[in-house]
Amino acid sequence: MKRYRQYIILIGIVLSGIAWVHADNWWEPVHPVQFTVPKGWPAPVYDFSSNPLTKEGINLGKQLFYDGILSKDGMVSCGTCHQPFAGFATYDHSVSHGIDNRFTTRNAPGIVNMAWQKNFMWDGGILHLDLQPLAPITAENEMGETLDSVLYKLNKHPEYRKKFQQAFGVKQITTLELGKAISQFVLSLVSYNSKYDRVMRGEDQFILPEKLGYEIFQQKCVSCHPPPFFTDFSFRNAGIPEDEVLHDKGRMRITGKSADSLKFKVPSLRNVAISFPYGHDGRWATLRNVFEQYRSKQPRNAGTDSLLKNGIMLSNYEIGQLTAFLYTLTDSTISNNPAFLPEELNRLQKQTRDIHQNK
Amino acid sequence: MINIRFAWIMIAMAGCIHQTAAQSISGKPLLTIQIEPMVGAKNWSPGDTYTNAVGESFSIDKCLFYLSNFEWQSTSGKWNKIPNSYFLVNIADSSSLQIQLPLQSKAIKGLRYMIGIDSVKNVSGIQQGVLDPARGMFWTWNTGYVMAKLEGTSAVSTMPGKKFTYHIGGYAGEQHVNKQVELVIDNKAILQQKLFIQADLLKWFNGEIPLSIATHPICHVPGKLAKQIANNYQYQFRIKQPE
């Protein structure tokens, strides 16, 4: 009997020892998610080993993405300007809006395929995806917050505390986990299911105007907007005049070099049909306006990119075909995917009958 | 029975090993660097007024800077790197004015460190501890650390509140402001493993190109002015000889 008691005490000590050692850092990312690189695409730039995707991390990132808690007045979230139905760009407003009815200085671009991007923002000032959300959070005309305050609010929030613990095994939320969580959601936005992609995979066919537009695109647009991202990620001066109010010098603000004056990152054309208006400050309302700008013979500024110096020759007919092709870059698995929408919206939509789908 | 006894012994031993491991970390020889914020020959005090080389009077409210990549020189002349040595000094926070360095030797001839943060840490995503962007020494819109920051007021400033603010950063190419400091150390300066280093903030203004608050009340971007100020402040450190 005495012997049994000793065994039991011994097992008890060992178990409580294990529990004590692991109490602080016992954690397992419960559901790892594999990041899939579409066939034929290059390897991603983002280092997934530093932030392995998990279901918990992506869901947490999505909740943060749509939560005004990141802003000073609780009203502005990432999703306010990066709207899902516009391919996660700002829809129908020239410049994006921040707190207190303030205008920002630029039109928020779509944020799909971010895993392949080296730098972020129209001026490329941000060098790591995890760091990107910190800029809008702290900009006084965007979310107007301080990191200290955001972290304070999150650490006080029982639900977020629990979810950060599940996703990253931390008791105290720091900037690092905040950045990683949002990155996880954004990284999951991979746009490769547009009609264009299906045609390239042999699963669909272009109709005639799309096919003709694709051929024109190959001749006149592809040097700056090459597939599969439809941008070469370079900074170029498109020859458009500086806005007299904003005085946005683009890339020059980052490098301090006058040669970079009025250069902006070549935007991706994925989901272009649903993400109007266009240009870094949303100055063009329609695709037609963009084509008119590019084919106009107006004098351009001194630093205009050599490819655009003399404008691009485009007939009305070509503009029509090109437009048809650009429409094939719309990816409804991005713009209309419940997995990327806020949970509350999904619940609401389930309750509402969709008359167009006759359900 | 033997097995049970053996298990008891193992548990006891595990406890002992755990103890020694904890001791050896804290048992490493430490050199404490005590930084004394000065303005010229006087100790810095908030609200006190000082005068720079161009004759402008000013007071200093705030000054923070990163010191990193410490190296120490043994008596044989060999330089030894201290891995992961990153410190954020805030003149208004006495705990941050003490820097503890783990050193393998008690006799040292020299000390080297960087004012600022190396480019690797600038481009490797979000860091933690003193390098956490939430510490307020990071530019979110143009990735990179603010290496050093000096703020105060002066009657000659044209900014609201008569303020001047110098946020010095830039780690790449021509914008590079990181400065290497090398101090020769006489072992008499180290008393009870403590070394006093004075940080003379007047050096921000007085240097190769004197900084005028009236001309330049602010510097918030990397570039020419930031480099000029960094050139000045790189000479702010001096060893204080014990009396």
Image: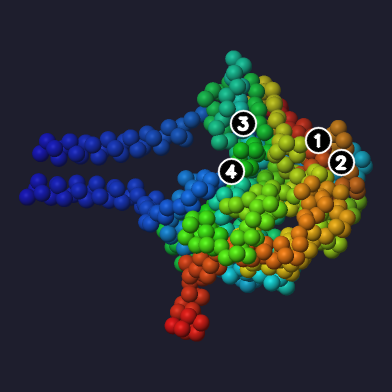
Above or below: residue B109 compared with residue A146:
above
Tell me what residue is drawn at x 78 percent, y 56 percent: A313
Spatial distance from mark 2 to mark 4, Cα to Cα?
33 Å
Above or below: residue B164 compared with residue B116:
below
Tell me what residue is drawn at x 85 percent, y 57 percent: A297
Above or below: residue B144 compared with residue A153:
above
Q: For residue A322, which quarter of the picture?
A: bottom right
Spatial distance from mark 4 to mark 1, Cα to Cα?
28 Å
Q: Are marks 2 and 1 on the same chain?
A: yes
Q: Are marks 4 and 3 on the same chain?
A: yes
Is residue A53 visible in the rendered structure shown here?
Answer: yes
User: Earlier along the polypeptide chain: callout 2 or callout 4?
Assistant: 4
Where is mark 4, residue-wise?
B124
Output the chain of dot 1.
B
Spatial distance from mark 1 to mark 3, Cα to Cα?
21 Å
Where is mark 1, residue-wise?
B232
